[in-house]
Amino acid sequence: MRAVSATAVVYAALFSAAGPAAAVQGGQPARAADYPWAVAVKPVAIPFSFCGGTLIAPTKVLTAGHCVDAFQKVPGLLQVVSGRDKMLSSDGTKVGVARIWRHPDYATFDYQGETGYRNDVAVLTLKSPIDAPTLPLARPDASDLYQPGRKARILGWGTTSSGALDGGVLRTATAPVIADSSCASASSYGDAYDSDQYTCAGDFAQGGVDTCDYDSGTPLVVDGVLAGITSWGVGCGKPGHPGLYTRVSTFSSEITAQLGTH
């Protein structure tokens, strides 16, 4: 779930033929103008995004570390798109990527047939600034943002169910933050869940509200603050297995250090 790879190219090609439908399981269509700091991340030569990100400075986009797997040595093959509701439209602004920073301790592991990620953080430096509002980062001491029951905003251009061939339209949903103890329980993610690395959000008991495939890197927003980065999970919207989001407060200092680089 949420993970991307070379299959993103196949995904984009299929969508080019079939046309897009929707994104974010359990959500509703959204206007990019209402979330101006949210951007899509895509290869230059392909019309569809395979990840998302958040504008944290005019030339800086925060995304998931696994979103840049194939592009670290060729950042010029990536671009971000802001202000676009439907990926097949020509609305909004496209800006190329000049440089990629990924957390030096980024790592992957296997869990129940899914690929999990540690230190799943990357910052894209853009070739030119985007004239749009930015979203503030969760501070290292922002534990209040991760209290169970806090209302979080999720959004993305990905699919509405795992393995689906829909996507390309911005959607959003409200997902409550879930207690770390629930996501670390034996019936959920167990030892794979690290509360320093992640926060989890969604409907734990019923499922049905979640980010999904190709939503990686998109923001989890709590009270107007960037609290999480869509990372991974088992399926999409499964009871007992909500989405996992990189906990921005843990990495806030390292992310902030990238704001001063060129």
Image: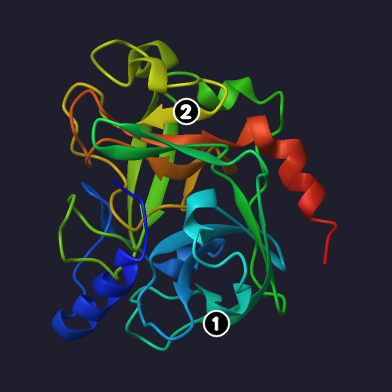
Given residues 174 and 220, the one toward you in this image is 220
Q: Which residue is mark 2?
A: 199
The colour mode here is rainbow
* Mark 2, other Cα within 10 Å: few <14 / some 14–19 / many ≥20: many
**Foreground disc of the pair 2, 1:** 2
Q: Is residue 184 left or right of residue 54?
A: left
Question: Residue 86: where, in percent of width, then height?
Answer: 33, 76
User: Along the line of sight, which residue is nearer the eye, 123 or 9?
Assistant: 9
Quadrant location of the C terminus in the rendered image: bottom right
Residue under the image location 34 percent in, 65 percent down: 170
CA distance separating discs 2 and 1: 31 Å
Give the residue drawn at x 32%, y 21%: 189
Q: Measuring 30% from the left and 60% from the top, which residue is drawn there?
A: 158
Please report the residue visible at 32 percent of the width from the left and 73 percent of the height from the top. Answer: 9
Element type at marker 2?
strand
In depth, the one of 262 and 89 nearer the eye is 262
Q: Are marks 2 and 1 in contact (CB under 8 Å)?
A: no
Q: Position of residue 50 (x, y in %)?
A: 38, 65
Q: Which quadrant of the figure has residue 166? A: bottom left
Residue carrying label 1: 93
